[in-house]
């Protein structure tokens, strides 16, 4: 059997893993596909978990990309609840927690990322959650009842989306951030300030430079303690303090990097049979002249398609212009490029919405952020994404 006729194995039955399986079929692969996932759920879309699911507009079951029958129709051998614990590159085999030992010929690692834990006294009390999976979203949705007090730790995209949903459900909300600005890793201060102003205008208490030292409560959390000695009474806590790439499996097989699974621009690791995509993938970006790792939906989609083609023998370099969105209250935030690489931001108005153009010290445009109504911002952001692709 030639390598191209042998089954292709995907570790990680999440967004990019499932989309890579679909892309393999779309691009003509008729051989076997095995999709192995640690979670028990059918592969699902995460963005609604911090939006529609918290607002009670969608159930987490409705977030699945495809019904179970799709996998049978496409002849994708779906193995759920089966974490892979070891890659034996020499023998070309994978070991699963249940002891199975499976051969692979080409391997795609699409293992995603995991929320950073809170390692503070009292962090194991009930009603303290991160938000990554359906169980988290369902538990948080259950806690967001009129009059409840929610503390959100971390003013990143997920923290602010949870704050917005909680507020809309009638909770009183406090957002605590250690850094001096919201979404500081990805956005310039002017954009962060505009987003935070939307939260404050509605009555959400957003605080910066605030450090949590622990939690009080009997079984469930009742208060958050700060370094200042202040005690904030609450009924629930959600934290979003960054994620770390799930690259330990690859690292143990000698393919790790400090920040993800390192690949070349074809999303291929130094082992020519092993590729990576999605949140875990640290790829060589020609556009930015450095390794880049992105944690967003569009990247999972785009890399899944490119990596599927390359698994089938094409040589497509991946170098898309990054793009992500967030929905909070009735506004959308859309971001193209890497605005954080800029040092100067110019603001333009489009109706009641705003565009923020971020340039570097040489005046080169590095990213564009837009805040406002989707109908105002979608077209200009798409246009600027095209402009950024030519720079
Ligand atoms: C709540 C939430 C809201 C979001 N909202 C937005 C948004 O509005 N806009 C946006 O652009 N992006 C958003 N994102 C980000 C986007 O969803 C992610 O970037 C995307 O899911 C990444 O896809 P992935 O395939 O890399 O990882 P995942 O979808 O996380 O899939 C990885 C899978 O691999 C599995 N796995 C890990 N290790 C193993 C192993 N050893 N064996 C088997 N399986 C393993 C994991 O359990 C997981 O199921 C959001 C993310 C979250 C959590």
Image (cartoon, rainbow, N blue to C red):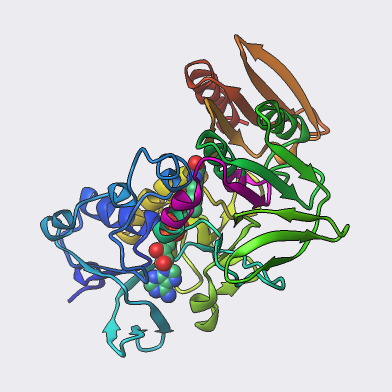
> Can you name the residue that lies furthest to the top here?
351
Please tell me which residue lies in front, 356 or 383: 356
Among the 4 quarters of the image, the one containing residue 13? bottom left
Is the residue 104 above or below the residue 346 in the image? below
Was residue 284 drawn as part of the magenta stretch in this picture?
no
Q: Quadrant of ligand 1?
A: bottom left
Is the residue 219 above or below the residue 165 in the image? below
Give coordinates of residue 279: x percent, y percent. 51, 57
Give coordinates of residue 70: x percent, y percent. 16, 53
Q: Quadrant of the C terminus?
A: top right
Taking the image as shown, residue 3 lies to the left or right of residue 84, namely left
Taking the image as shown, residue 324 lies to the left or right of residue 359, namely left
> Can you name the residue that lies furthest to the right here?
228
Give coordinates of residue 314: x percent, y percent. 35, 54
Q: Is residue 69 visible?
A: yes
Number of numbered discs on residues:
0
Please tell me which residue lies in front, 161 or 290: 161
Was residue 152 drawn as part of the magenta stretch in this picture?
yes
Which stretch is magenta?
138-159
- Which residue lies at the image location 60% right of the left edge and 44% below the top edge? 157
Q: Is residue 266 visible?
A: no
Q: Quadrant of the N terminus?
A: bottom left
Is the residue 376 above or below the residue 241 in the image? above
Give coordinates of residue 25: x percent, y percent. 21, 53
Please tell me which residue lies in front, 68 or 363: 68
């Amino acid at each position: 059997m030639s390598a191209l006729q042998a089954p292709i194995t995907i570790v990680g039955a999440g967004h990019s893993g499932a989309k890579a399986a679909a892309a393999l079929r779309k691009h003509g692969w008729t051989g076997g596909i095995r999709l192995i996932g640690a979670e028990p759920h059918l592969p699902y879309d995460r963005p609604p978990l911090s939006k529609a699911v918290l607002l009670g507009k969608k159930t987490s079951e409705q977030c699945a990309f495809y019904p179970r029958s799709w996998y049978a129709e496409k002849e994708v051998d779906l193995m759920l609840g089966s974490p892979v614990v070891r890659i034996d590159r020499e023998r070309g085999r994978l070991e699963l927690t249940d002891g199975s030992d499976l051969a692979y010929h080409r391997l795609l690692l699409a293992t995603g990322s995991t929320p950073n834990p809170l390692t503070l006294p009292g962090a194991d009390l009930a009603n303290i959650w991160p938000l990554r999976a359906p169980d988290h979203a369902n538990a948080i949705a259950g806690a967001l009842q009129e009059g409840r007090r929610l503390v959100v730790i971390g003013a990143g995209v997920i923290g602010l989306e949870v704050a917005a949903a909680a507020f809309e459900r009638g909770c009183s909300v406090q957002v605590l951030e250690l850094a001096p600005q919201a979404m500081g890793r990805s956005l310039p201060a002017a954009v962060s300030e505009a987003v935070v102003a939307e939260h404050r205008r509605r009555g959400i208490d957003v605080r910066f430079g605030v450090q949590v030292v622990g939690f009080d409560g009997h079984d469930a959390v009742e208060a958050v303690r700060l370094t200042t000695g202040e005690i904030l009474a609450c009924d629930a806590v959600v934290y979003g303090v960054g994620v770390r790439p799930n690259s330990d499996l690859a690292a143990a097989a000698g393919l790790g990097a400090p920040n993800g699974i390192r690949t070349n621009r074809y999303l291929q690791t130094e082992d020519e049979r092993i590729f990576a995509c999605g949140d875990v993938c640290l790829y060589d970006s020609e556009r930015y002249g450095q390794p880049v790792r992105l944690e967003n939906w569009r990247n999972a989609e785009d890399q899944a398609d490119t990596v599927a083609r390359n698994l089938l023998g094409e040589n497509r370099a991946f170098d898309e212009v990054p793009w992500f969105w967030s929905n909070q209250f009735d506004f959308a935030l859309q971001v193209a490029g890497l605005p954080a690489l800029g040092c100067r931001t110019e603001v333009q108005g489009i109706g009641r919405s705003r565009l923020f153009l971020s340039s570097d010290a040489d005046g080169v445009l590095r990213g564009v952020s837009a805040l406002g109504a989707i109908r105002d911002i979608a077209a200009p952001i798409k246009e600027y994404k095209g402009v950024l692709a030519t720079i």
